[in-house]
Image (spheres, grey):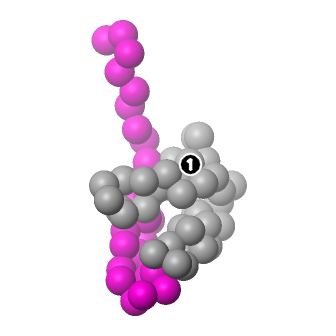
Amino acid sequence: MKGVTIMAAKIIGRVKSGKNNSYQVKWDKQTQEVYVSYAGWTRAGRAGTSGHAMHVAEAWLYNK
């Protein structure tokens, strides 16, 4: 299956934005990519641990 990417990201929790909206957070342990359920699954950055991934997502959502 050429050109197909398999995303191994798992939902690890929920965070709130600065406007008090709640969003799910996914983290891919292999690639260390963090995704937030904001306008679909949007890449929010990278994190080495799931705990750090939650902080990255929260910071990314702060003004949203």
Could you tell me residue 45's position as x and y percent?
Answer: 60, 54
Q: Position of residue 58 (x, y in %)?
A: 55, 75
Is residue 3 positioned above or below 40 on the image? above
Can I make out residue 41 in this image?
yes
User: At 56% from the left edge and 48% from the top edge, which residue is drawn?
Assistant: 33
From this viewpoint, which residue is outermost toward the right?
Answer: 48
* Residue 23 position by quadrant: bottom left
Query: Amino acid type of disc 1?
Result: Glu
Residue 35 magenta-drawn?
Answer: no
- Local secondary structure at mark 1: strand
Chain part drawn in magenta: 1-27
Q: Which residue is mark 1?
A: 33
Q: Position of residue 8 (x, y in %)?
A: 42, 41
Q: Residue at x 38, y 15 (%)?
A: 3
Compared with 39, 13 (above or below) is below
**What residue is rendered at 42% in x and 53% in y?**
42
Residue in the picture at 52% in, 78% down? 63
Q: Quadrant of the N terminus?
A: top left
Front one among 46 and 8: 46
- Name the one closer to the observer, 29 or 4: 4
- Mark 1, Cα crowd under 10 Å, few <14 / some 14-19 / many 20+, is some
Q: Residue furthest front?
A: 63
Q: Is residue 2 left or right of residue 58?
A: left
Q: Based on the picture, tell me whether residue 14 belongs to the magenta stretch.
A: yes
